[in-house]
Image: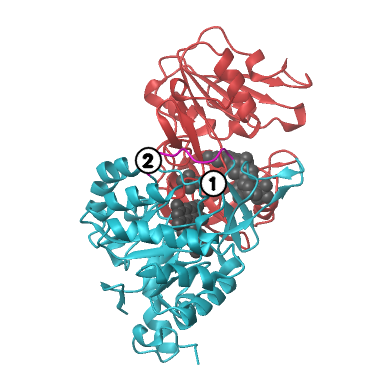
Amino acid sequence: MKQSVFTITENAPLTGAVYRLRLAGDTSAVTAPGQFVNVALPGLYLRRPISVSDASDGQLTLIYKVVGKGTEAMAAMAPGQTLDVLSGLGNGFDVSLAGDAPLLLGGGIGAAPLVLLARRLRAAGKTVAVVLGFNTRDEIFYENEFRAMGCDVTVATADGSCGVPGFVTDALPEDYSFYYACGPEPMLRAVYDRAAGDGQLSFEARMGCGFGACMGCTRQTAAGPKRVCKDGPVFRKGEILWDA
Amino acid sequence: MSVTLCGVELDNPVIPASGTFGYGYEFAELYDIDCLGTFSFKGTTKEPRFGNPQPRIAECRSGMLNAVGLQNPGVKAVIGEELPKLGKVFHKPVMANVSGFSVEEYAYTCARLDAHPQVGWLEVNVSCPNVHGGGMSFGTDPAAAASVVRAVKAVTTKPVIMKLTPNVTDIVSVAKACEDAGADGLSLINTVQAMRIDLKTKKPLLANGTGGLSGPAVFPLAVRMVYQVYEAVSIPVVGLGGVSSAEDVIEMMLAGATAVQVGAANLRDPYACRDIIAALPGVMNKYEIKTLRDIIGGAHG
Ligand SMILES: Cc1cc2nc3c(=O)[nH]c(=O)nc-3n(C[C@H](O)[C@H](O)[C@H](O)COP(=O)(O)OP(=O)(O)OC[C@H]3O[C@@H](n4cnc5c(N)ncnc54)[C@H](O)[C@@H]3O)c2cc1C
Ligand SMILES: Cc1cc2nc3c(=O)[nH]c(=O)nc-3n(C[C@H](O)[C@H](O)[C@H](O)COP(=O)(O)O)c2cc1C
Ligand code: FES
């Protein structure tokens, strides 16, 4: 974990409600895809957890959906402005579990952390399939970015306006070695129930600190209570327990 | 900057508050936590507790609500696993925060922690519901609070600091009852019972319904209570509630605090305590304060 100041280099909408924020600063604490940062925003008491979508030397990309006060404030920020960021939070996805042909499943904004994951897996020579689920065609983002990385991309839309009609679980391919999923909890539940084989799933929780100090984000798991921020946000399929 | 809390000297009066500093390791990754006066670790109970369902955290203007529900691994694991790890990153006496749901449970947990060499003080949180008292919190009834003090004092040798809840009409009567029963010190305030409602679901945002409010929003309330309690008792008072700066530390001490805890501020800014300690000499200088000991209770006539 590291606290540092990042400078905004880009902040622009990808769709109506989804923005891409590019930041320049010290990315040394980011060690794995699927980790997140916790962003302090002026006037708001708690930081906002946002996944690292992409990272390279000195540059961090976040993709966020405007849903409330904090993300509205983020959307109003301009290049040149700075943000106080805690980076390198959470465990992230374990790329060593991928096998030869991993499957990446993203629901809505859950596609964001799959970008760096896909990049790492492609760099390791894996055959990567990506299924992205959205509500409707206007909400689709990054389909082409995943293709440009050499991934086999399928899009599903809940209203059938583009690609496979339905959810990501309606577009699961037959064969894959391991899956990685990120998205809203009902999607994760459906993936857990319906996707064959082993996988890792990335969860959200309301957070007080984001770095393991407050027990605000705890989930029950097969291995006892775990903090989503520190022991997660990524959990192996076999660890996961669902609320009744 | 040093102060003496119940006979134990602190290099400075700044203490991270229970529940906002874990067992210290997350912060030790960021800075040398030996700069702290001490710290109060997560509330410990006799048995392990999972705590409340999600969501447990909500935000408000100038603060936050939590309904963590005293998640902790239980006193046996705290002594067996957490304290040895904590001992590697913090080399001063630590404050052991204890919760319970019956007088016997408080006594059991306190006796075990009292025996541990790393523990310098016991901080007994009486905000919990008394399962034998119709679920009413020990800390809202002077007689129930006093019964906890007596039971804990009977089985411990280290200073016992009673942590009081602000969710009462008369905090002074609870404070006095604790002093009369033999408490060595008092800390106040715990969180203020509060609620947020989600406009989308039109239901309380926290799964528990209510949660405890803390952060800058409660600071003036805490200063008032510390001031009133200081006036009424002669044992030392630890002041907390919304403290976020060196100025706040000094204000709390003027109200009557011997030492000052910092809670929610650590969650937004993990360096909060380190930075407050670093800023204290400059702020003391600005207000012409030579030694912090001299200003304790300075606001009183
Ligand atoms: C590990 C992790 C990674 C995330 N990654 C992304 C991402 O890459 N892109 C993205 O758009 N969103 C992501 N989220 C969700 C994002 O944190 C919330 O959408 C955001 O905090 C909402 O803030 P707000 O002020 O706009 O909303 P408000 O509803 O006004 O926020 C009020 C409070 O609730 C919290 N909160 C609200 N919704 C969520 C939520 N879904 N999860 C956690 N806390 C919430 C806020 O942090 C804040 O404390 C992630 C969440 C977690 C836990
Ligand atoms: C997430 C969280 C967890 C807490 N857990 C405990 C606890 O276990 N025991 C306790 O005595 N107080 C607990 N508290 C209360 C704090 O120690 C402190 O009394 C209160 O938050 C007021 O201080 P603040 O405004 O500086 O946060 C907790 C507070 C927070 C925010
Ligand atoms: S958010 Fe504080 S422990 Fe996870």
**Image chain in cyan:** B
Residue A156 percent location from the top left of the image: 69, 20
**Does mark 1 fall on the same chain as mark 2?**
no
Separation of residues labelled 2 and 1 (CA atoms): 20 Å
Q: Is residue A63 visible?
A: no
Residue B73: image tag = 2
Contact between labelled residues 1 and 2, with CB atoms less than 8 Å apart: no
Question: Tell me, what hue is chain A?
Answer: red
Q: Residues within 10 Å of mark 2 (few under 14, many from 20)?
A: many
Q: Is residue A162 visible?
A: yes
Establish if B170 lies above or below B45: below
Is disc 2 placed on a helix, strand or loop?
loop
Which residue is depicted at the point 69% across and 53% down? A69
Kindly identify which chain the residue marked by label 2 belongs to.
B
Q: Residues within 10 Å of mark 1 (few under 14, many from 20)?
A: many
Tag 1 residue: A207
Splitting the image into 4 quarters, where does residue A96 fall? top left
Residue type for callout 2: Pro
Q: In terms of secondary structure, what is the magenta stretch mainly?
A: loop
* Left or right of residue B8: residue B280: right
- Report whether the residue tagged 1 is closer than 8 Å to ligand 3: yes
Residue A201 percent location from the top left of the image: 51, 26
As rendered, which of B247 and B154 lies closer to the eye? B154
Magenta-drawn segment: B46-54
Residue type for callout 1: Met
Which residue is depicted at the point 34% across and 84% down? B293
Give the number of the mark in front: 2 or 1: 2
Residue B51 percent location from the top left of the image: 50, 41
As rendered, which of B43 and A235 lies closer to the eye? B43
Establish if B228 lies above or below A67: below
Is disc 1 placed on a helix, strand or loop?
loop
Residue A64 sits inside the magenta stretch:
no
